[in-house]
Image: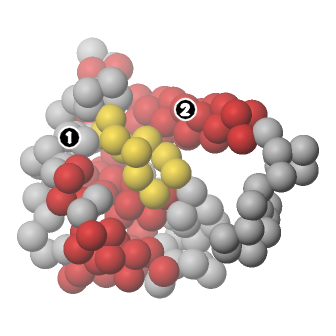
Amino acid sequence: MSLGPAGASLNPDQAENFEDMEKQFAVKAVQHMTTYWAILEKMKGSQLRLTKMDDEIYEHFKTDFPEFDPTKTIDEDQMKSKEGKEKWRNFMTTYEKKIGDYNFGTMLRSNPKYEYGEKETIFAMRMQFYAIEIVRNRQGLNDWIYEQAHA
């Protein structure tokens, strides 16, 4: 979709319906969220592969974000700060031609100890989701979901 050159005025008669686009995005993000949760209920996260590139993503993330503690609540303000955005942008662009929808918005639990909820969920890019959830899964931090579903 193009809105025309930067600085050009938007003609409302020619613009797509942004409200419909927002609804479609929300539906896709919720579908992704519920699908991921359903998978975690059926399989331990520690046994799950999210992409064909999990090993590469894991190593790259650990190198670029050595301070990240997957057991802690994500500091959304830091993640979305100017410096945080730049660091994530550099990380994500590596996967531009390797991971489909790498920059598509999705929902991410801010802490692996909790289910998705209004206060426990943040908006993130797909590559942020993959990187963080791959680390969480490798460390067994999502296995409680499977165990709870099978108790």
Please tell me the numbered disc located at residue 99: none
**Up-down relation of residue 117 to residue 122 (above or below):** above
Residue under the point 14% across and 44% down:
73
Residue 148 lies, in percent from the top left, at 27, 21
Residue 2 lies, in percent from the top left, at 78, 65
Q: Residue furthest top?
A: 151
Q: Circle 1 is placed at which residue position? A: 111
Instruction: Determine contact: label 2, label 1, CB under 8 Å.
Output: no
Residue under the point 47% across and 84% down:
94
Q: CA distance from mark 2 to mark 1?
A: 18 Å
| Residue type marked 1 | Asn
**Foreground residue, 14 or 17?**
14
Residue under the point 25% across and 42% down:
110
| Residue type marked 2 | Val
Q: Identify the image quadrant of residue 6.
A: bottom right
Residue under the point 9% across and 70% down:
67
**Foreground residue, 112 or 137?**
112
Q: Circle 2 is placed at which residue position? A: 30
Would you call the spot at circle 2 few (<14 residues within 10 Å), some (14-19), or many (20 or more)?
Answer: some
**Foreground residue, 4 or 141?**
4
Residue 54 relative to residue 150: left or right = right
**Up-down relation of residue 51 to residue 55 (above or below):** above
**Earlier-in-chain disc, 2 versus 1:** 2
Q: Identify the image quadrant of residue 142.
A: top left
Q: How is the image coloured?
A: secondary structure
Determine if residue 5 is in view. yes
How many labels, in total? 2
Residue 150 relative to residue 66: left or right = right
SS at mark 1 in the image: loop
Point out the image quarter for the N terminus: bottom right
